[in-house]
């Protein structure tokens, strides 16, 4: 019994039951692959549910901070300035995932415009600053996806 269940704990408990009770009873290889894939997806969802909101907020804040600096340094970056204004004007402090996701999508547009602006500008330090934001995003994605799972090959 989980006394204070979180979403990750519940998902991990389901995985444990699938692996300990269901999988050993399954002899059909194709069904076993389905179980292995379900466990992999549930484990990724457990990690994501524990971190997704914080990751989106952190990434969006970092994007906004860099974009503000770039707009000040690159007066010709009008698309970036417009995207930043749209993001800032609609930014929500809501704790609902759907609202945070909308902010994240708008921040992604700001990041895209920042990328275009720094590549047009050509300054290596500015390009590296934007690249760092993409690296941050990819690192979060890799944590969720995890390592390759050869489902049904255990």
Image: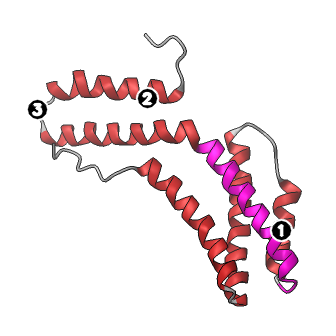
Against 14, residue 29 (above or below) is below
Task: Please give the label number shown on residue 27.
Answer: 3
Q: Is residue 12 left or right of residue 37?
A: right
Q: Kindly state the secondary structure of the residue where label 1 is placed.
A: helix
Residues at circles 1 and 3 in contact by the CB criterion of under 8 Å: no
- In the image, which residues are magenta? 52-76
The residue singled out by tag 1 in the image is: 68
Quarter placement of the C terminus: top left
Mark 1 vs mark 2, CA separation in Å: 39 Å
On the image, the x and y values in percent for residue 111 come to 69, 69
Q: Give the colour scheme of this rendering.
A: secondary structure
Q: Residues within 10 Å of mark 3 (few under 14, many from 20)?
A: few
Kindly identify the residue that appears in the image at 16 percent across and 26 percent down: 24
The residue singled out by tag 2 in the image is: 11
Residue 6, quarter of picture? top right
Q: Is residue 45 left or right of residue 73?
A: left
Kindly identify the residue that appears in the image at 87 percent across and 66 percent down: 85
Quarter placement of the N terminus: top left
How many numbered tags mark residues here?
3
Observer-nearest of 107 and 25: 107
Q: Is residue 31 left or right of residue 98?
A: left
Observer-nearest of 151 and 50: 50
Kindly identify the residue that appears in the image at 76 percent across and 67 percent down: 66
Q: Kindly state the secondary structure of the residue where label 2 is placed.
A: helix
Kindly identify the residue that appears in the image at 82 percent across and 47 percent down: 92
66 part of magenta stretch: yes
């Amino acid at each position: 019994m989980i006394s204070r269940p979180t979403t990750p704990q519940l998902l991990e408990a389901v995985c444990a039951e699938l692996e300990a009770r269901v999988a050993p009873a399954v002899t059909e290889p194709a069904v076993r692959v389905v179980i292995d894939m379900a466990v992999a997806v549930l484990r990724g969802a457990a990690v994501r549910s524990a971190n997704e909101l914080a990751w989106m907020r952190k990434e969006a804040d970092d994007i906004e901070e860099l974009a503000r600096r770039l707009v000040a340094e690159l007066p010709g970056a009008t698309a970036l300035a417009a995207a930043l204004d749209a993001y800032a004007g609609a930014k929500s402090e809501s704790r609902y995932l759907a609202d945070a996701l909308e902010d994240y999508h708008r921040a992604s547009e700001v990041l895209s415009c920042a990328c275009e602006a720094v590549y047009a500008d050509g300054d290596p330090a500015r390009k590296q600053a934007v690249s760092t934001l993409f690296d941050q995003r990819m690192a979060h994605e890799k944590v969720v996806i995890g390592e390759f799972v050869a489902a049904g090959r255990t």
